[in-house]
Amino acid sequence: MNTISYKTVSANSQTVTKNWVLVDAEGQTLGRLASNIAYLLRGKNKPDFTPHVDCGDNVVVINAEKIVLSGQKATDKQYVRHTEYPGGQRFTTPEELLMKRPTKVLENAVKGMLPKNRLGRELFRNLYVYEGAEHKQEAQKPTKIEIKDVK
C-alpha cells in the first residue's frame, strides 16, 4: 500500500518573498480600500500564509486625498485622541483630517484592521501612503494592481 504524506508549509522570515505593490486610492471607498490593503499587508492572498509571520507585501498607496467616505461619515464620524493631560480629550472628523493630513485617515483605517500586537506594528511599517501621484519608492519598482482583484 502506497501512503502519501503531506507536510504543512510554515513560512518564516527567510522563506518569505515580499513584493512591492502600488495601489491608486482615487475614487475608492475608505473602508473597502483599507480592508483590502490590510489583507495585502497581512499576506492572506499568498498560499504560504502563516498567521504569526510577516509574510505580506509592501504596499504603496498614492492619491490618498481622493478617497471617498460613504453616507454622512465625513461629518458624523469622530476620531478621538487624548493629550494625556486632565480634560485633554480631542475630537476630529474625517473632513477636518482630510484637509490637514489626508494620509492619516487611510492610515488610521488600515491600522485598525491589523492585529493589535507586535506583529501588527511590524506589518504597519510596510505601508507607505502619499497624497499625490508621486511616491518615493520608484527604485523598488512596485507593480500596480487593481484593488478590486485582490481577493
Image (cartoon, helix red, strand yellow):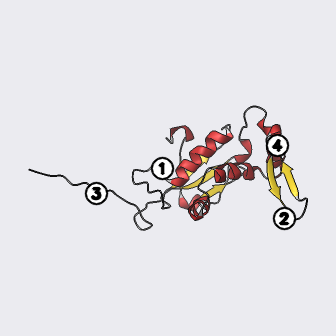
Q: Nearer the viewer, mark 4 or mark 1?
A: 1
The answer for how far apart the CA atoms under marks 3 and 1 are is 19 Å
Figure quadrant of residue 121: bottom right
Amino acid type, residue under disc 4 in the picture:
Glu
User: Looking at the rendered structure, which numbered label has been put on residue 7?
Assistant: 3
The answer for how far apart the CA atoms under marks 1 and 2 are is 36 Å
Going from N to C along the chain, the mark reached first, 3 or 2, is 3
Marks 4 and 1 close (CB-CB < 8 Å): no
Q: Where does the image place residue 129, in percent across and percent down from the top left?
A: 67, 54
User: Looking at the rendered structure, which numbered label has been put on residue 95?
Assistant: 4
* Residue sitting farthest toward the right: 87
- Local crowd at mark 4 within 10 Å, few (<14), some, or many (≥20)? some
Q: Which residue is mark 1?
A: 44
Going from N to C along the chain, the mark reached first, 2 or 4, is 2
The answer for how far apart the CA atoms under marks 2 and 4 are is 24 Å
Q: In the depicted view, which residue is nearer to us: 117 or 29? A: 117
SS under mark 4: helix
Q: Which residue is mark 2?
A: 84
